[in-house]
Amino acid sequence: MSIGVGIGMDETVIGSLVKAFALETKSVTNEVKLENDWHTRNFENGGSWDTRFGRITKSALEHGLVVLQRKRGTWEFVVVLNTETGFLYVFSKEKNFDIVQKKFGKNKIHYFHAFVSINSGPVDLDDLQQELFPRFPEEYEQKRIEEVRKILGEEYPHVNRIVFVIGKEESKRIVNVEAKLYNRYFELVDMEDWSKYIPSDQYGDIFVPNEQINDEVEEPKVIPKVKQTIKNRKRDGKMPTRKTEKERKEDKGM
C-alpha cells in the first residue's frame, strides 16, 4: 500500500518543485562564465546546484512550504519541509545518491544516512538496545541520531519522514525524477514517479551559442589574448628563436 510521498501537496506544488529541480542549469552557468571570462569549469558543479537550490527555494516559498538551508562541511544545501505532514524533501542526483546508499552502515556517516534514521518513527536508544539482533552497533546509531538532530536543529521535532527527490541525469539534463521513501535501514518503502512534471522545454531564457553548450572534450588551444601577444612579440622581433648550428658556432668564436 502506498504511503503517499507527496501527501499534502497537490499536483501544482509537486510540479513546481520538480520543474525547479529538473530545469537545466547549463545556460545559467555558461552566462556567468562568459560574463567573467572564465575558461575553466571548476564553477560548473557548484554553480549548477546553487542555481537549482535557488529555484527550489523560490518555488517552495511561493507555495507556503518551509525552506531549511543547512551546511555540512563545505557543502551547503536546502531541503523543503511540508509542515502539515512533517515530510521533509531532500534533493539529489541518482548517481550521487547511489554512491551514498552503498556506503550506508560504514564508519563515515553521510547526512543522508542520518536523515533516514527518522523514517521509522521517533528513535529511542533504549528501544535499539532491546532489539534481538541490532543491524548496526549502538555507537553508529547514536551518531546518526546526533547528526540528524544537529542538522535539523529546532525543526527536528517537526519532521516525521524524509522523502528523497532523485533525478536521473543524462547529457547534463535531468530526464527522470522519482520521490522515494526509505526506512531507517535504507530499504525502499514507497516510491512515486514524478517524471511527468519535468518541463519539456529545458533550455531556459538565456541564449548560449551551441559551442558553449557542448560538453565534449576539446583540443587544447591557446587563449586568444595570449595568442595575440605572442604574435606581437614575433612581429617586434622580441621573441627568442632557435639559432642555427652556424650561428651558435659564430657566437662561440669557432
Image: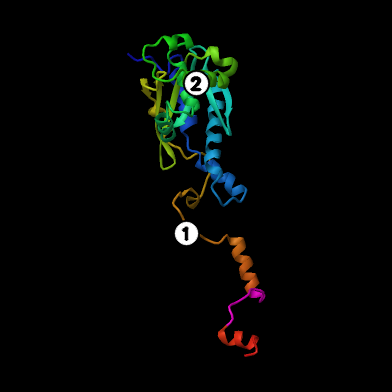
Q: Which mark is residue 56?
A: none
The residue lying toward the viewer, choosing from 82 and 103, is 103
Q: Look at discs 2 and 1 and give the one toward the viewer.
A: 2
Which residue position is annotated with label 1?
219
Residue depicted at 53% across the width and 28% down the height: 56
Above or below — where is 227 with respect to 133?
below
Residue depicted at 59% across the width and 15% down the height: 154
In this picture, residue 92 sits left or right of residue 245 = left
Name the element at disc 2. helix
Q: Residues within 10 Å of mark 2 (few under 14, many from 20)?
A: many
Q: In the rendering, at what x and y percent does residue 16 appear?
A: 48, 25
**Image quadrant where one finds the N terminus:** top left
Q: In the rendering, at what x and y percent does residue 144 appear?
A: 49, 21
Residue 128 is a magenta residue: no
Which residue position is annotated with label 2?
144
Q: Which residues are magenta?
A: 235-243
Which secondary structure dominates the residues rendered in magenta? loop
